[in-house]
Image (cartoon, coloured by chain):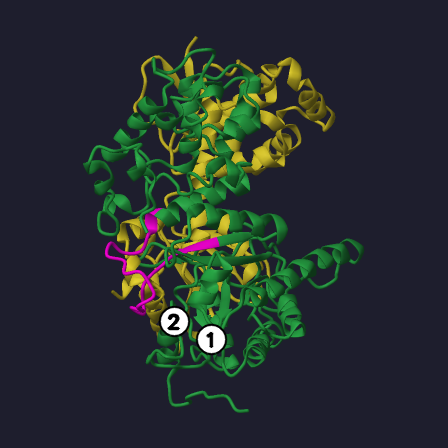
Chain colours: A yellow, B green
Amino acid sequence: MQEKYIICEDSLEGIFTAVYDAYALREGHEHLHVQVGEEENYRLFAEYLYSRPDLGKNDKVVRTLKSRLGEEVYGTICRAAASYDKTKGDAVYHTIVDGITGQCNNGVSDAGEKSTVKRSARSGGNGRHTMENLRNPYVLKTFELARRTANEVHHELEFIRFQELEQGILYAKIGPENHVVPFLMPHFADRLATENFMIHDEKRAVFGVHPAKGDWYLISGVEGFDEKSLVWSDKELAYQDLFTLFHKTIAIAERRNERLQRQMLPLRFQEYMVEFSQK
Amino acid sequence: MEVRISPQMSVMDKLRILSDAAKYDVSCSSSGSNRRNDGTGIGNTVAAGLCHSFAADGRCISLLKILFTNECIYDCKYCINRKSNDVPRASFTPDEVCELTMEFYRRNYIEGLFLSSGILYSPNYTMELICETVHKLRTIHRFQGYIHVKAIPGADPLLIQRAGYLADRMSVNLEMATADGLREMAPNKHRRNILKPMRQIQNGITENKNELTLYRHAPHFCEAGQSTQMVVGALPESDYQIMSVAENLYDKFSLKRVYYSAFVNVNEDKDLPALTSGPPLLREHRLYQADWLLRFYDFKVEELLTVERPNFNMAIDPKADWAVRHLEIFPVEINRADYKLLLRIPGIGVKSAKRIIAARRFGPLTFEDLKKMGIVLKRALYFITCNGRMMYPTKIDEEYIVRSLTYQNQMGKGERLPFLADGTVYRQTSLFDDGMILGEQGYRSIS
C-alpha cells in the first residue's frame, strides 16, 4: 500500500490535529506518517496531505489522550511534541496509536504480573503503561525526546537569569534547543507570584509573560523587538557584580576543575548567565 | 553586649570575606522540601532541588552560602577561621543578609540561603543572631524559598527549636568521624555537644510529623530533614570507621544526608598531614559512592568493608568491588531477577532497574534493548545474561573481570571519574605502575 505523509504545523496543536486527521482517514495506521514542518525529500510513490491546526480537533485529541492514556503519559507526549527533533510527529503519532489500541499492553501476560494489569483496567483505561514499553521503537523515541525536553526544562529552571529593568520588571533571555517556555512559566509564576516578569526565547521569538498576581500567557511572532531598548534598573549592575564575586569566591582553589564545571553547566547555558559574561 | 560590626565595610567586601570563609562547608542541596507560594511574597521549594550555577571547582551553587560572621572564639586546627589565625574578619547585619537573599533569589541566582557562622562571643549569642536573621527573612520579607541553617552546638535548645520552625533544613557538623579525633582537632568542641542538638532536631522532626497528621496546617519543623558533614583525610581513620559512623547516623539519627569533605590543608598546622597531591578527592568520591549504596541500593557497610579490609579499592568502585567478590550469585538473568538483585549489578542503577522491571512485562529484553534503556553494558556485561546468554563469552573470574574493568579505566573508557581525566587534581598512575592491581597497593587508602 502507498505510504501517506500528513504534513502539519510544528506545534502541539498542529501535531494533535494531524493525529486527528490521520484517524479520520480510517485507513489503518501502518502506512500513515505525521511529518512536522515541511516535507524534506519528496518520496516517489508517497502521497502528501496537509493538515491545518484546528482547536476543536486538538481539544478532542487532548480529551481522548487524558482519559485513555492518563495524565502522566499525556504529559510525556506534550514534552516529546515540544522537542526540536523533526521526527517527533511520527514518534508521537504511533505512540498514541499503540497506546490506544493496546499494543503496548497486550504483551503484559507474565503469570506473576497479572494483578497489575487488572488494577490498571479497573482504574479506567489500560494505556497508562504505554511509556513503559521501551521495546517499541516509537515509544522509545517518544521517551527519549520527552526526556531530553524535560532535562532542558530542568536546566533552564536552574540557569535562567532575570535582569531587573526600570519599574522593577524582571526580564530573562534564553536560547533553548526545545520549546521549553510553556514548561517554565508555571514554575516561575508560582515562585515569583508577586513579580512582573517575562521570559524571552530568542530562537523562537516567543515570550512568556507574567503580570504580578495575575495569570501567565505566551506571545509568539513578535517582530521588531529590540533588546537594546531595555533599560536596567539602577541597582541591577551592582547585584550582577555581587553575584559574580560570590560565584568566584565560593570555589575552592585546591579543587579547581573546569572540566567538571563545563560538564555540569554546558557552555550553551553559560552564554546567557551573568556570572560568566563578565570574565 | 554590642555587635562588633565594622560599619565602614561595604557589602561587597563582606560578601567576599564571608563567602570565602563558608566555602569549605559542603552541603548545598536544596532538596527534600516541597512548598507552593502562598501569594504574599516570593519563593517556593522544589522537592528535587535546583542547582543554579557551578563554581570553578565543579561544585554546585544552589544556596547563598555565607557565614554570618567569621569571628570565632574557638581554635579548631583545621579551620581557616580559628581564632589564632590572622585573617580579615567581618560580620553581616541581619538586614544585609535579607536583602542579598531576596535580590539574588528574584534574579534566579540562588535557591535560598545557607547560613552558618563562626562563634561570636558565645554559642547562644550566635544562634540568636542566626534566628533573628532568618525570622526577619521569613516574616518581614515573606521569603518562602529554601533556608538551611546551622545549629550551633552548645546553644540553648529553645533557640534551636525556634530556628527549626523557620528553616527547611538544619545541620550540625560532626567534623571528625571519631570522638578522639574531634578532641585532637577541635579542643573546644565535644562530641556530646554535637550529638545533643542532632538528637533534638531528630525528635523535633518526628513530633512535627505526628502533629501534621493531626493538624494539617501546623507549622513545619525542618521539613527537609537534617544533615551533617565529616572531614576526610585529616586523621588516619579508615573508610570502614567513617562509613560505620555514617550508617549509624542514618539509622539512629534519621539523617537525610551525610557529607564527606576531602581535607584541604589551609592552616599548615604541624598536627595535620601535608597533602602533596592535593585533597584526597578519589577517596571522597568512593565514600560518596558507598553512601549512595547505603541509602538507595540496600547495602550494609559490613558487606562493603570489614575490619580486615578497612579501605575502599581505589581502582574500582565499591559496587563493582562487591560484585567481583560475590561471583557466586552472577551472572544474573535480566528477565527474571527481582528488583533488589538487579540493583546489585554493576552498571544498573535505580532508574534502569525500574525501567527493566516495567519493560520486561511486554516481552523478553535483549542486550540491544538494555543498551537503549541506559544500562552501562561495559560494566554490566560480566554479570548478566539476557535469555540465558551472556553478551560475549566471558570468564566469570575475579581477576579477569577486575583486569577488564581497570583496563577500561586506563584507556579512559571505563568508570567516569569527575576529576581524573583532567589530570590536574589527582594522579592514579602510581597504582598501576608497578603492575599491582589487586595487591595491597590497590586497596590502600591514598591519604
The image quarter in which residue B10 lies: bottom left
Q: Quadrant of the C terminus of chain A?
A: bottom left
Q: Real-space Cα distance between discs 1 and 2?
A: 9 Å
Chain ID, mark 2: B
Q: Nearer the viewer, residue B339 or B12?
A: B339
Verify whether residue A162 appears in magenta. no
x then y, percent, for residue A125: 68, 25
* Residue placed furthest toward the right: B214
Q: Are marks 1 and 2 in contact (CB under 8 Å)?
A: yes
Mark carried by residue B335: none
Report the span colored magenta: B259-282
Q: Residue at x 42, y 27 (%)?
A: B325
Q: Is residue B64 something that shows in the picture?
A: yes
Q: Amino acid at mark 2?
A: Ala
| Residue behind mark 2 | B21
x then y, percent, for residue A229: 34, 68
Badge 2 local density, few (<14 within 10 Å), some, or many (20+)? many
Q: Nearer the viewer, mark 1 or mark 2?
A: 1
Badge 1 local density, few (<14 within 10 Å), some, or many (20+)? many
x then y, percent, for residue B39: 63, 65
The image quarter in which residue A113 lies: top right
Q: Are marks 1 and 2 on the same chain?
A: yes
Label 1 vs 2, first from the N-terminus = 2
Q: Quadrant of the N terminus of chain A?
A: top left
x then y, percent, for residue A205: 38, 51
Q: Residue at x 44, y 54 (%)?
A: B260
| Residue behind mark 1 | B118
